[in-house]
Each structure stands twice: as C-alpha cells, then as structure tokens.
Image: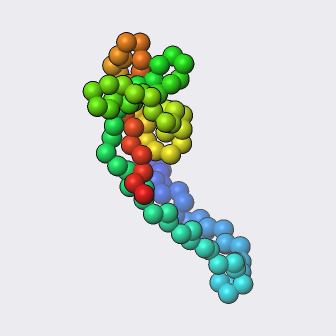
C-alpha cells in the first residue's frame, strides 16, 4: 500500500511577493494624536416627564432643570434607571468637570 503524504504543501514553493517601493519613497504613516480622557463629576438623578421636561431634586423638592435629557446626552453620560416615579423616567447623569 502506498504511503500518503500528510504534508502536501512541503514541496511547493510560495509565489514571490511583488516588489515594494523602498521605505524612503513610501508615504509615512502618521499616528493620530490621542484625545485626553474626559473626567466626569459625581452622578445625579433627573426625572423626565411625558412632555420631555427634566427635573432635579434640590432642597427637598423636584425643581425644573435647565437642560433636557437629550442635551445631557450630548455633553455627558446618561443612564436610564429601571424605576419610574409617578409615570416619570429616572436618569443618572454625569457631566464633564471643567
């Protein structure tokens, strides 16, 4: 019985690579500068009602907040919390520290 060759590619030559331009002629690869990491402040809780108005808890009461949740998402980190309060959605917001 004939012996089977398990290494079929052993006797074959690989095709030659195409000629590449010398390093001096190739354009230099530029590494982009890294952005500094954002530093966020302490998280705080906001409520959003059905009309997309935002409220924050201050001095024992829920008062209107200056920014909407959509604006907070653009500037910082916003995480929706699972519990709802009086049909309002709770969000945890972290804005960047200046």
Residue 87 against residue 47 in the figure, above or below: above
Instruction: Please indicate whether residue 41 sits to the left or right of residue 14 in the image.
Output: left
What count of labels does the image hold?
Answer: 0
Q: How is the image coloured?
A: rainbow
Q: Position of residue 64 (x, y in %)?
A: 45, 28
Q: Residue at x 40, y 33 (%)?
A: 79
Q: Nearer the viewer, residue 94 or 67?
A: 67
Residue 94 against residue 11 in the figure, above or below: above
Residue 6 against residue 47 in the figure, above or below: below
Q: Residue at x 50, y 25 (%)?
A: 53
Q: Residue at x 53, y 69 (%)?
A: 33
Q: Position of residue 72 (x, y in %)?
A: 49, 39
Q: Nearer the viewer, residue 69 or 8?
A: 69
Figure quadrant of residue 22: bottom right
Instruction: Please indicate whether residue 75 sits to the left or right of residue 20 in the image.
Output: left
Figure quadrant of residue 85: top left
Residue 58 against residue 2 in the figure, above or below: above
Of all residues shown, which one is farthest toward the bottom?
24
Q: Residue at x 42, y 46 (%)?
A: 95
| Residue 3 visible, this angle | no
Q: Position of residue 63 (x, y in %)?
A: 40, 27
Q: Nearer the viewer, residue 24 or 57?
A: 57
Question: Is the C terminus in the top left, top right, bottom left or bottom right quadrant?
Answer: bottom left
């Amino acid at each position: 019985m004939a012996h089977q060759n398990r290494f079929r590619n052993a006797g074959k030559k690989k095709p030659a690579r195409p000629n590449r331009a010398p390093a001096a002629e190739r354009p230099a690869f530029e590494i982009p500068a890294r952005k500094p990491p954002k530093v966020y402040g302490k998280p705080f809780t906001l409520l959003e009602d059905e009309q997309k108005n935002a409220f924050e808890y201050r001095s024992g009461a829920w008062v209107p907040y200056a920014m909407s949740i959509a604006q907070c998402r653009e500037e910082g980190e916003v995480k929706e919390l699972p519990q709802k309060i009086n049909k309002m959605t709770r969000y945890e917001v972290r804005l960047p520290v200046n």
